Image (spheres, rainbow, N blue to C red):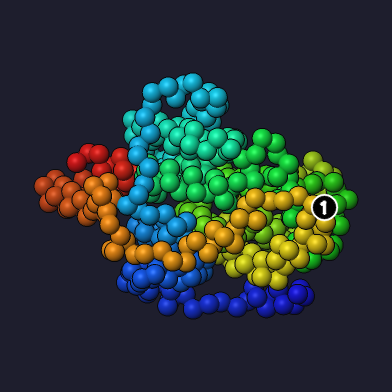
């Protein structure tokens, strides 16, 4: 695939309105089986999944999670005995910037405790997984959107698939994924690739981008959510393609920097706040289509190491294709609570609004965005 074809792929756009209409009307989610391909396209195309209410419906389907069979809330007895307890607590306590500005301290503290519980429970249920610093950045993004129990189910599924290479005992598999970055750059901009090679900058500047799905480095939560829409609907290597796209987008800045490892690393490690993410997402998809992982693996001799995330992806994708819509599943009591959750919240908010006025309504809506399950516990 030539650079010309890549640029052609970048310029092309699917029809966004069709996917948005199908989502908003519930058609893709309600079909039997669920139209998972339409959901993936909607999550990946311009605008993504629009809002958190839509994400609560679609994210579980993208990961083949039965909303009526969620894990129970984890208990806290004995959690201090877990090997990673101290490190998880330290990382979570340092994650205050990941919570919305202005959130009441008591609410943030409660969510941080839930975050610790979720992480330790997933690790306890999956002894083959090993905690890494940055894992909590993924977990907190899920928690703030879908609530505690769904976040735990999603985190467990991601940990065994998309994030699996980061959860080995060593960083060898993570370095293997990072090694795809330079071959992508070489395919599109050989001059930029050669400049970075001469600077000996390596790829460590993109480590936190990769292992946190950019959650740790973006200041605007809306950008993080947009990227999560994209990554949840894509191949596990898509974050490294987006990383390459960001470097290519900044190629003039890079080339104008002194060809020195420290200088180039400093430039690339700090992501500008005004990046055009919709444009970059389209370009990353174009890169992936033109230079798929098998092609890069052959050219860069990367096939010597087996990636669990990559090798299991095809089976994972196939498993999502035959999901039943929520309306035909057989919910138990817990499932009924999840299904009725949004309706309960809406009724409660309407009641508050009618009784106490618009100010309380605004506060309640904001609380719902911060933590849907925490808000549900008020009623």
Relative placement, left or right, of 306 versus 29 is right
Q: Which residue is mark 1?
A: 196
The residue at the point 42 percent across, 22 percent down is: 78
Residue 377 image point, x, y percent = 25, 39
Residue with the most extreme right position: 198
Above or below, comparing residue 245 to residue 161 in the picture: below
The residue at the point 58 percent across, 51 percent down is: 162
Of residues 72 and 204, the one drawn nearer to the viewer in this rendering: 72
The residue at the point 32 percent across, 52 percent down is: 68
Quadrant location of the N terminus in the rendered image: bottom right
Quadrant location of the C terminus in the rendered image: top left
The residue at the point 46 percent across, 21 percent down is: 80
Residue 290 appears in which quarter of the rendering?
Answer: bottom right
Residue 18 image point, x, y percent = 42, 78
Of residues 352 and 286, the one drawn nearer to the viewer in this rendering: 286
Residue 245 image point, x, y percent = 68, 61
Residue 254 image point, x, y percent = 77, 54
Relative placement, left or right, of 222 versus 73 is right
Above or below, comparing residue 377 to residue 224 in the picture: above
Name the element at disc 1: helix
Residue 66 appears in which quarter of the rendering?
Answer: bottom left
Of residues 104 and 122, the one drawn nearer to the viewer in this rendering: 122
Mark 1, Cα crowd under 10 Å, few <14 / some 14-19 / many 20+, is many
Q: Judge whether residue 370 can be spotted in this image.
A: no
Above or below, comparing residue 238 to residue 89 in the picture: below
Q: Judge whether residue 263 can be spotted in this image.
A: yes
Relative placement, left or right, of 285 versus 74 is right
Residue with the most extreme left position: 355
């Amino acid at each position: 695939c030539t650079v010309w074809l890549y640029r052609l792929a970048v310029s092309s756009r699917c029809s966004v309105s069709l996917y948005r209409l199908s989502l908003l009307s519930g058609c893709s989610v309600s079909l039997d089986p669920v139209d998972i391909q339409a959901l993936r396209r909607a999550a990946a195309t311009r605008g993504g999944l629009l809002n958190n209410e839509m994400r609560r419906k679609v994210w579980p389907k993208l990961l083949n999670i039965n909303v009526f069979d969620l894990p129970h809330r984890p208990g806290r007895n004995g959690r201090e005995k877990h090997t990673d307890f101290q490190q998880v607590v330290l990382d979570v306590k340092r994650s205050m910037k990941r919570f919305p500005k202005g959130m009441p301290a008591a609410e943030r503290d409660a969510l941080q405790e839930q975050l610790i519980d979720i992480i330790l429970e997933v690790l306890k249920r999956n002894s083959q997984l090993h905690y890494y610093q940055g894992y909590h950045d993924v977990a907190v993004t899920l928690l703030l959107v879908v609530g505690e129990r769904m976040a735990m189910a999603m985190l467990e599924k991601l940990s065994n698939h998309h994030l699996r290479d980061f959860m080995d005992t060593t960083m060898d598999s993570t370095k293997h994924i990072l090694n795809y970055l330079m071959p992508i750059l070489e395919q599109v901009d050989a001059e930029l690739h050669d400049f970075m090679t001469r600077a000996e900058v390596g790829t460590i500047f993109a480590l936190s981008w990769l292992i946190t799905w950019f959650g740790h480095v973006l200041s605007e939560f809306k950008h993080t959510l947009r990227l999560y829409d994209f990554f949840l609907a894509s191949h596990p290597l898509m974050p490294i393609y987006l990383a390459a796209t960001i470097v290519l987008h900044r190629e003039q800045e890079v080339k104008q920097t002194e060809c020195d490892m420290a200088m180039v690393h400093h430039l690339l490690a700090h992501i500008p706040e005004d990046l055009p993410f919709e444009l970059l997402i389209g370009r990353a998809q174009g890169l992936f289509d033109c230079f798929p992982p098998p092609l890069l693996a052959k050219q860069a001799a990367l096939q010597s190491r087996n990636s669990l995330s990559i090798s299991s992806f095809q089976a994972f994708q196939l498993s999502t294709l035959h999901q039943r819509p929520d309306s035909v599943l057989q919910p138990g009591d817990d499932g009924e609570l999840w299904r009725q959750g949004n309706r309960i919240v809406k009724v409660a908010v309407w009641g508050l609004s009618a009784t106490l006025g618009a100010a309380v309504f605004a506060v309640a809506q904001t609380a719902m965005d911060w933590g849907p399950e925490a808000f549900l516990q008020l009623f």
